[in-house]
Image (cartoon, helix red, strand yellow):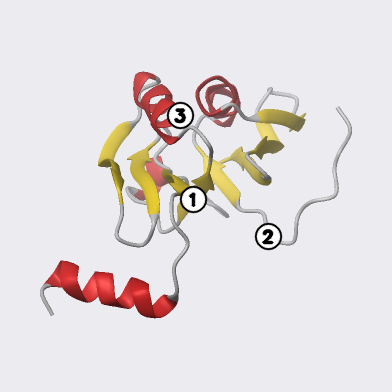
Amino acid sequence: MTPTVLPPLSPMLAIKGAKAAMDWYKQYLGAEEIMRLTDPAGQVVHGELKVGGGVIMLAEEDPAHNLSPATAGHTTVILNLIVDEVDSLFASAIAGGSTVIFPVNDQFYGYRSGRFQDPFGHQWIVGKLLEEMTEAEMQKRFDKLIGC
């Protein structure tokens, strides 16, 4: 495969089991593999996947430089993926072994979205815009939600 010019912002994920993760993201999130570089042992040292309209990069974790969520015990970044078929993609991710954090629902901010943690410890919000609104309208709805 041919390397691509990356978008202005592309997350780089450290993953324990990067080879399996690339295959999982293709199977359950509909990702398209752009490239995969491996070392002599077959470990992914750099991979790129097209997911939705963006690109994620990933590599096998290296405890000296980049810990995976599996090793660190948590993640500090949540990936947000906008798709047309929220419910079916969410169901696919759960069928593939992801854990539901928040089920898919219509949200006060105008999206239908849900959040899951994939089998490699990374968290994803998948959503679809249902309704455009102003910041003032969003604030009004939030205030109502929290009882202000």
Residue 92 vertical position relative to residue 132 in the rendered view, above or below: above
Q: CA distance from mark 3 to mark 2?
A: 23 Å
Q: Are marks 1 and 3 in contact (CB under 8 Å)?
A: no
Say which element carries label 3. Answer: helix
Please state which amino acid type lies under the numbered disc 1.
Leu
Mark 3 or 2: the one toward you: 3
Q: Indicate the quadrant where residue 30 lies.
A: top right
- As rendered, which of 18 and 57 lies closer to the eye? 57
Number of disc labels: 3
Q: Of the numbered discs in the image, which one, if any, rests on residue 79?
A: 1
Q: Is residue 93 left or right of residue 41?
A: left
The residue pinned by badge 3 equals 89
The residue pinned by badge 2 equals 9
Q: Residues within 10 Å of mark 1 (few under 14, many from 20)?
A: few
Q: Residue 51: x and y, percent?
A: 63, 38
Q: Indicate the quadrant where residue 14 lies.
A: top right
